[in-house]
Each structure stands twice: as C-alpha cells, then as structure tokens.
C-alpha cells in the first residue's frame, strides 16, 4: 500500500514539474523571474499555480495600449520641435552638461518625452498640504479636471474629493477619473455613481470593473496624475486615502513627496492621462478636433524649472524610468541620495549603485523601518544589508512611514514620481516620474532629505550583522522571490 502511495506521489511531483516547466517557459520573461516562478511552482504544488494565476501571467497583447492617433501625433509634433532646438541651450547654462543632454535625448527617443522649460514647481511632502492645494485648484477649475490614481479610497478624504468633483461636474466642468481596482480595494464602482450621475466619467484602468473580476495582481496602474484646465498638474507618490494624511495608526505619519507643476510640463501629464483614458474607455474617448485648444492651452509662465515627464509600463520593453534611474546613478560625481519604500533592485541597478559607492560617491538610501507588505519588506532589508556591505549608507526612517520615491544627484538633477526602486515598478506597473533639471529644486530635495535624516537611523554593516539568524533567514527567503514580488 505504501508503495502505491509513493508511486502516486512521484507521479504528482513529475507532472507538477512538467506543468511548471511548460507554464513558465511558454512566456518570454527575464531569467531571474523565470527561475523564481519555477521555484514557486515546483515547491508549492497547486498553491503555486494559484499564485501564478494571480501574479504570474503576462498581460495579453489584446489588452495592451491602443494609442489614440491624434494624441500621439500631438506628442510627436512637440517632440520634433524639441529635437530642432537640441543644438541650442536646452536648459539654463549653469546646468548644461553632456550627461544632461544625453538624458534628455534618451527620454525623447524612448518615451517621446519632450523637454518642458520654464515651469513653476512646488515640492510637497505633507498630505495635508497636498490636499489643501489640490482641492483649492480643483475648486477653481473652469474647463477640465483629470484624475488618475492607483488608490482612491472610500474614506473621509476620498469622499471630500468626490464631493468636490460632483460639484464641479454639476457646474459643467469636464471631470474624468481613472482608478486602479486593486489599489483601490474596497472602493466599488457604486462609490462613483453620484459623480457619474452628475455628468462625470469614471473608469477602472483598462476597463476592468472590479478587483474580483480582474484576476491579475500585476500590471497595475500605479500612476498618480492630476491635471486641471491643462494648466496645473500634480505628480508624485501620494494617493487618495486617509492613510496618506496620517490617519491610520498602522503607519503613523505618512512621509511622501509630490510635485505641483504649473507650465508646459502639464502638457505631458495631460497627454499621458489622455493616452491612458483612450486605452481604457472606448465609449467616451478624447475627440481629435478638441484636443489642442481645450486640453493644451497656451500659457506663459515665468518659472525656472526644466523637466521631462517620463512614463513606463508593461506596454513597452524599454523600462524607461529604470533607464532614467540608472543614468542618474551613473551621472553622480559627489552625492546620490535616494528615498524609496521598496528596495528590490535588479542586478543592473544593484551593480550601478555598488559601482557608484565604490567610486567614492556619497550614496545614501532611506527606507521605512516598518513593513506594509511582509515579504517585500524582508526582501528590502536583504538588499539594504548587501548594499551596506558595499559602502552604501542605509537609513531607516522612524517618524512614521516613508513612501517617497525620490533621487537627487549632486544638487543638480533629480527625479520625483510614482516608481519605486524595485522589479515591480521597473517591469510590472504603469508608472510616471518627473526628471528635473534645476539646481534649485534639487537642492531643496537635498535639504528635505537632510531634515528626514534627523528622524532616521544609520544602519551600519555591524548593525545588520547583529540581526537575528531567523530574521536573516526571512530576508534571504524573501529575496529568492524578489523578481516576482
């Protein structure tokens, strides 16, 4: 009898391994993710396949972006204008360098990201300040309000925003909202019905109606975009929810970084929203003959900031934001300061950080001292420990939860946006960042970083070594799954 059981078990193991092989290798993916999934599927029969169904499958080509032609044409025309000016002074003379010019060119080629000049940019690090400004701007809107967030919760601030959007829609302002159903878990479509009844338009990203129907955990719309009248824009790390105002005991104070942009940089935020909308909602697309005048009004702004809005996602194999991060790392000569809630870099980014530190660059990475996702946090600790051994200064932020996604180089150039320093942001999520070529804004971000250091602890290699064996085991085990976290 025992022999029969052993035979059945052996058959199950062999069949499971064969199915795992076919399942993983039938789709193109990088080798690290391939072997991580093989590990899960082989060691966790049945359970592993259930996990794969939710987070392992690739996005079908039929669901990829169908870019609305006229919007794409508008972007290409603006990009061509910028290419003609590349030989001239593309940014103020004190910022000119080959690294900056090369980065501008790279984003133009890979993401049609034109260089927006003379913007007014405000850096916002507190949720109360952000929503105060944003609600004031929405209140003054007279033409259009476009909102795209990973998280739009049905809570106090979510209802405050919704009530104002209803009011503006009733007043005849065009209101469109894109939300991600997984990121907005618990917020049902019925929550938005009063806004729809008032004349607004609301869609779950890529047409998915609910988190229950949407079988995939991957390929989420992690972008955070607000444009108002095509003249004011917001981009960064905050979402819409009470926890982002420090109202959740689990997280405490929420430390994030967002930008308010006035100027031509809003053009790219508006265009990105329109592309996402037309890929999501075929019933109410943006019309060709209304695009330029209504949504891209000519504005004269006396600002000092040059920037590029760069987006990336699984609709492209180029990983544009990751390329931007790597270019920033390689550009650093003195200082490279990073804030990220999740530190799970792939080998290329990991090596770039190590090389910078070993070359004498002051590389600092600030991460939370508490988890919001257990496996992700243990993997973050693992990579933090490895980088500390290579000379990177690792800081654990103690004053609540740090969710900012920022990188600042030598007080000259910087990045602020939605993309974390991890596999998911590089390959699996739809993300958006602002790459900023302005010493004044970069210096301000360095000052903010230094202020955050007062609430942070430098975790030396010795402190990492003093961690318990069990904790290190959890970190190492989580790291094995890092390509699919």
Image (cartoon, grey):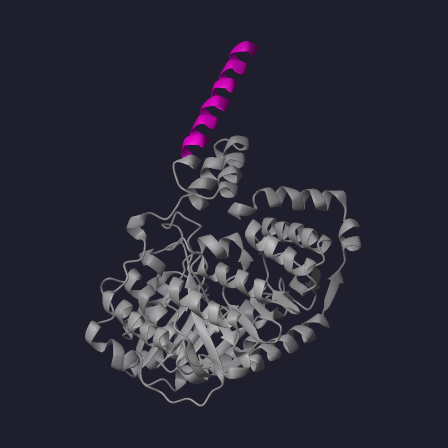
Judge whether 49 appears above or below 109 on screen.
above
From this view, report whether residue 295 is shown above or below residue 368. below
**In the rendered picture of this protein, how many numbered marks are placed on residues?**
0
Residue 46 horizontal/vertical position (percent): 47, 32
Residue 286, percent from left and from top = 25, 70
Residue 10 highlighted magenta (yes or no): yes
Front in this rendered view, residue 192 or 458: 458
Q: Can residue 476 be spotted in the picture? A: yes
- Judged from this view, the residue extending furthest toward the left is 289
Q: Residue 166 in the image: x percent, y percent?
A: 35, 77
Whether residue 250 is situated above or below residue 28 in the rendered picture: below
Q: Quadrant of residue 366?
A: bottom right
Which quadrant of the figure has residue 432?
A: bottom left
Q: Residue at x 63, y 67 (%)?
A: 336
- Magenta span: 1-23
Say whether residue 237 is visible: no
Q: What is the chief secondary structure element of the magenta stretch?
A: helix
Task: Name the residue rendered at 44%, 50% in the picture.
Answer: 217
- Please check the rendered image and state whether residue 373 is part of the magenta-colored stretch, yes or no: no
Q: Residue, x 46% and y 64% (percent of image)?
A: 151
Q: Nearer the viewer, residue 140 or 415?
A: 415
Q: Quadrant of residue 232?
A: bottom left
Residue 306 location (% of width, % of height): 47, 79
Residue drawn at x 50%, y 83% is 92
């Amino acid at each position: 009898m025992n022999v029969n059981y052993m035979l059945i078990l052996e058959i199950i193991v062999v069949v499971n391994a064969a199915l795992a092989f076919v399942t993983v290798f039938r789709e193109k993916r990088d080798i690290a993710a391939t072997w991580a999934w093989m590990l899960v599927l082989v060691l966790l029969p049945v359970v592993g396949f259930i996990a794969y169904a939710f987070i392992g499958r690739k996005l079908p080509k039929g669901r990829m972006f169908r870019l609305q032609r006229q919007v794409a044409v508008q972007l290409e025309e603006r990009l061509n204008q910028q290419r003609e000016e590349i030989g001239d002074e593309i940014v103020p003379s004190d910022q000119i360098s080959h690294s900056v010019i090369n980065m501008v060119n790279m984003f133009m080629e890979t993401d049609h990201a034109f260089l927006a000049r003379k913007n007014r940019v405000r850096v916002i690090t507190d949720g109360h300040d952000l929503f105060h400004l944003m609600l004031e701007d929405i209140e003054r809107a007279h033409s259009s309000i476009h909102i795209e967030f990973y998280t739009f919760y049905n809570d106090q601030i979510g209802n405050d925003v919704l009530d104002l959007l209803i009011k503006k829609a009733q007043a005849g302002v065009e209101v469109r909202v894109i939300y991600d159903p997984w990121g907005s878990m618990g917020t049902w479509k019925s929550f938005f019905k009063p806004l729809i009844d008032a004349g607004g338009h609301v869609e779950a990203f890529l047409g998915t109606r609910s988190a229950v129907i949407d079988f995939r955990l991957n390929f989420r719309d992690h972008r955070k975009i607000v444009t108002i009248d095509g003249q004011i824009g917001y981009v960064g790390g905050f979402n819409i929810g009470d926890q982002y105002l420090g109202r959740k005991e689990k997280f405490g104070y929420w430390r994030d970084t967002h930008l308010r942009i006035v100027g031509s940089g809003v053009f790219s935020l508006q265009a990105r929203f329109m592309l996402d909308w037309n890929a999501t909602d075929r019933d109410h697309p943006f019309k060709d003959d209304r695009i330029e005048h209504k949504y891209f009004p000519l504005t004269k702004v006396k600002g000092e900031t040059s920037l590029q809005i760069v987006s990336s996602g699984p609709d492209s194999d180029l990983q544009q934001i990751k390329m931007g991060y790597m270019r920033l790392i390689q550009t650093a000569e003195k200082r490279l300061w990073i804030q990220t809630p999740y530190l799970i870099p792939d080998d290329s980014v990991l090596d770039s950080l190590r090389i910078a530190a070993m070359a004498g660059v002051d590389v600092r990475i600030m991460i939370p001292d508490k988890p919001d996702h257990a496996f992700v946090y243990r993997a973050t600790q693992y990579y933090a420990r490895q980088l500390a051994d290579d000379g990177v200064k690792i800081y654990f932020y103690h004053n609540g939860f740090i969710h900012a996604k920022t990188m600042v180089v030598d007080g000259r150039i910087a990045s602020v946006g939605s993309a974390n320093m991890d596999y998911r942001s590089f390959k699996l999520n739809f993300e958006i960042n602002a790459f900023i070529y302005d010493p004044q804004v970069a210096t301000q971000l360095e000052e903010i970083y230094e202020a955050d250091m007062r609430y942070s602890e430098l975790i030396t290699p010795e402190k990492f070594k003093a961690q318990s064996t069990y904790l290190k085991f959890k970190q190492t085990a989580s790291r094995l799954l890092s390509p699919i976290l």
